[in-house]
Image (cartoon, rainbow, N blue to C red):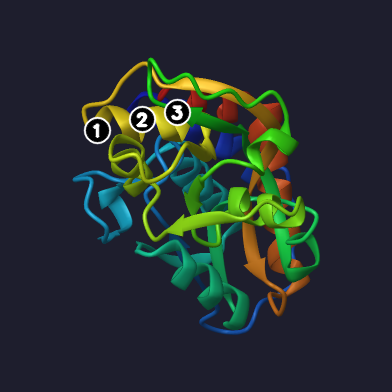
Amino acid sequence: MRKSWLGIAGVLLGCALGMGVTHAELPPGYRVVLLTENFPPFNMAVDDKNFARDDAIDGISADLVREMFKRAGIDYNLSLRFPWDRIYNLTLESPNYALFSVSRTESRDPLFKWVGPLGKTRKVFMTLPGSTVKVPDLAAAAKLRVGTYKNSAVSQILKDKGIVASEALRDQENIARLQKGEIDVWATTDVVARYLAKQEGVSNLQTLLSFQESDLYLALNKDTPDEVVTRLQQALDAMRQQGVVDSITNNYL
């Protein structure tokens, strides 16, 4: 997927490097440990497995983050792991760790340093086609059996709204839970949910209510040097201005 824009990106990178931008020095051997999960089409393993490294990871955010680090001149290693709950807490607790794609919510904002946005999503309540369940507002959702994904942005938003949800370790588990009648609605992220449902042989999910839009970011451990955050944000801003962000995004959508 990345080949179609690499030539253009290389030319633009050459121009950017020729502008004489100087940066503060980072410690010798400095490297960021980048973590991600299967969250298509933003980040995903090429073989759909729950573990992958480096070039075996694809997606909009994965390609954006690679290009950001290249332009910023910062070394990294990248791996895709499972479950989200584990890699989220690992990034929260470990210096020089970073995680994407993370919804930047009010409750998360003070916990990390941020670079972005990388993309945008909608948080929704969904159910199977043909269901008669109605969710006109969040108050109605509070009376239903809601399934969501443990420690996800959706789960945290529901908790903040006082809505009790049953959390699964993998978001796609909620598709089977809907089919078995174990939950009434699935609180999830729209584009990702439709992709996961298709992988499980389910199509035409009903969107009952859209309750929040979120920007997706690279979240860095709070002990990350400010120089790293500045370089990465400047790289992303330049990529957006030069049309590279749109090129990468359109390659997947």
Q: Amino acid at mark 3?
A: Thr
Alpha carbons under labels 3 and 1: distance apart: 16 Å
Q: Nearer the viewer, residue 82 or 19?
A: 82
Q: Amino acid at mark 2?
A: Tyr
Q: Amino acid at mark 1?
A: Gln
* Circle 1: element type: helix
Residue 206, placed above or below residue 24: above
Which class describes the residues within 10 Å of circle 1: few (<14), some (14-19), or many (20+)?
few
- Counting residues from the start of the chain, the first of labels 2 and 3 encountered is 3
Q: Is residue 144 left or right of residue 193?
A: right
Measured from the top left, where is residue 63 in percent x and y?
Answer: 45, 41
* Circle 2: element type: helix
Q: Is residue 79 visible?
A: yes
Circle 3 or circle 1, nearest the eye: 3
State yes or no: discs 1 and 2 in contact (Cβ < 8 Å).
yes
Q: Nearer the viewer, residue 163 or 20?
A: 163
Measured from the top left, where is residue 216 in percent x and y?
Answer: 63, 43
Q: Quadrant of the N terminus?
A: top left
Measured from the top left, where is residue 109 in percent x and y?
Answer: 78, 60
Q: Nearer the viewer, residue 214 or 211?
A: 211
- Dividing the picture into quadrants, the one containing residue 114 is bottom right
Q: Which residue is mark 3?
A: 127
Q: Is residue 250 visible?
A: no
Measured from the top left, where is residue 241 in percent x and y?
Answer: 71, 28
- The mark found on residue 67 in the picture is none
Which class describes the residues within 10 Å of circle 2: few (<14), some (14-19), or many (20+)?
some
* Circle 3: element type: strand
Q: Which residue is mark 2?
A: 195
Residue visible at 51% across and 77% down in the picture = 90
- The mark found on residue 199 in the picture is 1
